[in-house]
Amino acid sequence: MALSPETFTTRKRRPRGSSFTSPKVNDLNVLSSLLQLTDQICSLNLTATLLNRVSSSTIRKTQLLGVVFEELFRVSNLNSDSVLFLCLEEMYIVLHKLKTLIQDFSNGSKFNLLMQIDTVAESFHRLTGELSTLLDVFPLQDLDLNDDVRELVLLVRKQCSEAKAFIGAEHVSLRNDVVLVLDRIKNEIVPDQAHLASIFEKLEIRDASSCRAEIESLEEEIHNRCEEQPKTDLVALIGLVRFAKCVLYGASTPSQKTVTLRRNQSSELAIPADYRCPISLELMRDPVVVATGQTYDRVSIKLWMDSGHNTCPKTGQTLSHSDLIPNRVLRNMITAWCREQRIPFEAETDTGKLNGGVTNKAALEATRMTVSFLINKLKGRENDNVNVPLSVEDTNGVVYELRVLAKTDSDSRACIAEAGAIPVLVRFLNAENPSLQVNAVTTILNMSILEANKTKIMETDGALNGIAEVLISGAHAKANAAATVFSLSGVAAHRKKLGRKTRVVSGLVGLAKSGPEGARRDALAAILNLAADRETVARLVEGGVVGIAAEVMAAMPEEGVTILEAVVKRGGLVAVAAAYAGIKRLGAVLREGSERARESAAATLVTMCRKGGSEVVAEMAAVPGVERIIWELMAVGSVRGRRKAATLLRILRRWAAGLDGGENEGFPTTTTMVASSTTTVVVPTTTTTTSLAQ
């Protein structure tokens, strides 16, 4: 079935915040407010060629009214009960609406304006009619105005009364062309490049930069639309613009100035605490509610559950069910905040699955055409010509386009993988060009968000070795390589394979030890996932992860103590011995850390005391005020935290009474006097240390 202009139903975009502002005018400031408003309208910059005739006419009428308001300001004494005052107050409201209308279509998407040109033209006509009605009742005969001003009022009244809704025939024809192109894409017919270029030229979208701006405007329009309004028309337009950008103007990367600006803004940005996931401490992309009513990011809580936990990480309560309920209110708040901060926010429900999970056919086919075009460029094929080599700069541009596309939605990630992109991208993981390496590994990272792609990446020859190489020697891509390992390790079956890659483990440990803060967090998150596999824990301990976890407790207590808990739990006596020196740090976290960090610290100390014996208990007992700290945790901690604190208190009291402090699972032992009695204690001896070094 062919598309028609009616497919793009006449829906107004949600008005900007200013249009909801009720004008606060009274008998003292109504004229000054009108003068200020007319100045604002006359100074508007008309960037859109569509409806330029109508908007220019509106501005000219406003200029003439401004002269009338100036004369009234000079000669009139307004009474708030007068007909003149009421008339001027209504004029303010109408002019305010006209200003908002011009601003919206001038600063918004050109394609969306073209699709709704009937509605916008009708809005202009309706508001002009309202202005005409107000001028009809304007008490001109009661005012002491000079003849020139009287003639201006009559002129504007005549112009408003005779105005008609105007849409140029060329605009109607252009809209029909766009609908025809979308219809052909929907039927899997690649658009003619010359025809496509003609459309974009008429809309004055002439380069990659203006295409990016148009895509951003369309995405903003999606966010502005009410939930009940279908958004498939806008999604199709985004797909069309993306395809045209690559085909007509070539793949390209953003300017270095833009990249630097975004990096600086990101580093300086303070994310509101309510928008952070309690597990990852990162901005939540898909907030969900668990059975206890707590909210987490879907990826993080799913990893928690997949690791065998059946409790709420924040409260410690057992989950009555494993259902994850989307927190749409919080998601909308995060989306709005990201839009205000100019932060890219992945909104899969906005650009991928729509209206109950139905994918927009035109958007999907446009994505496939775009991906096919980009992959063929990388493979050296263009227009059925083989061996068309790309420069490093051009290659980087194509990979960057795939990176952006892989970030948009699940359909795009699936299309990229189906087109055979993964083996091609793996070739660029060892690229000498740092920017190309960053774009390649980030594209793989974005693709790995889709569950089906994780297995494809793991099974691609050279993929894991390439990611490991980036982890160890990448110039600027180490953090994203660590994030890729974190994403891949979300599948339990992949953890063992990743843990057997010595270079992956050593790369993560090295990055956690000496990388920048953001990269260290990514590495620690990946290490925590890998620590769910007992075999991998041994390699992590050998790599020194216990010492690193203890070191980072001061700056990142939650990350450090959570990793230590996981490693000690699954690492046996060797891990306990390695963690022995960190007991005092655990005591500091137990005293000053967040609720979750204190809970993990208590759980770690319980495990160490049970496995390590009296020497570990004695070291814990030496922490200043430890018993008071434990009592406090028992009073105000989470359910799990209180339970672990009670266990610690029992262990301490048994130790003080001269009883065994732990289970004594195999450390070499010595004998010492504690509390005037002979007690078996566990001491990390030279033998133990030597075996650790091996």
Image (tube, helix red, strand yellow):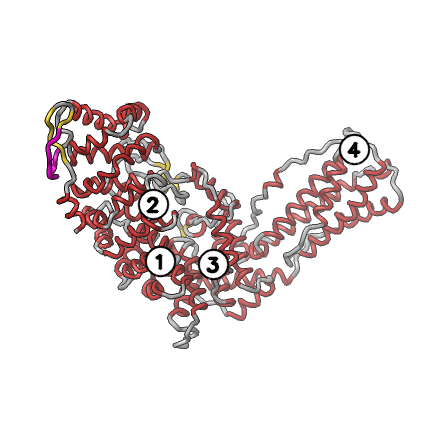
Q: Residue at x 45, y 64 (%)?
A: 397
Question: What residue appears at the point 23 percent right and 43 percent down from the top-left corner?
Answer: 567
The magenta-colored residue range is 663-672
Sequence order check: which comes first, mark 3 or mark 4? Answer: 4
- Pointers 4 and 2 in contact (C-beta within 8 Å): no
The amino acid type, in three-letter code, at marker 1 is Ile
Disc number for residue 239: 3
**154 sits to left or right of 464:** right
**Residue 37: in magenta span:** no
In this figure, which residue is indicated by the disc labeled 2?
Answer: 299
Q: Nearer the viewer, mark 4 or mark 2?
A: 2
Q: Is residue 385 left or right of residue 160?
A: left
Graded by Cα atoms within 10 Å as few (under 14), some (14 to 19) or many (20 or more), the crowding at tag 3 reads many
Determine whether, in the image, residue 286 is placed left or right of residue 321: right
Spatial separation of the CA atoms under disc 3 and disc 4: 53 Å
Residue at 35 percent across and 46 percent down: it is 521
Q: Amino acid at mark 3?
A: Gly
Secondary structure of the residue carrying tag 2 is: helix
Location of residue 563 in the rendering, given as x and y in whole percent from the top left corner: 27, 42
The first of marks 2 and 1 along the sequence is 2
Left or right, 65 with reference to 104: right
Rendered image quadrant of residue 112: bottom right
Disc number lying in front (1 or 3):
1
Q: Which residue is mark 1?
A: 444
Q: Which mark is residue 83?
A: 4
Distance CA(mark 4)–CA(mark 2): 63 Å
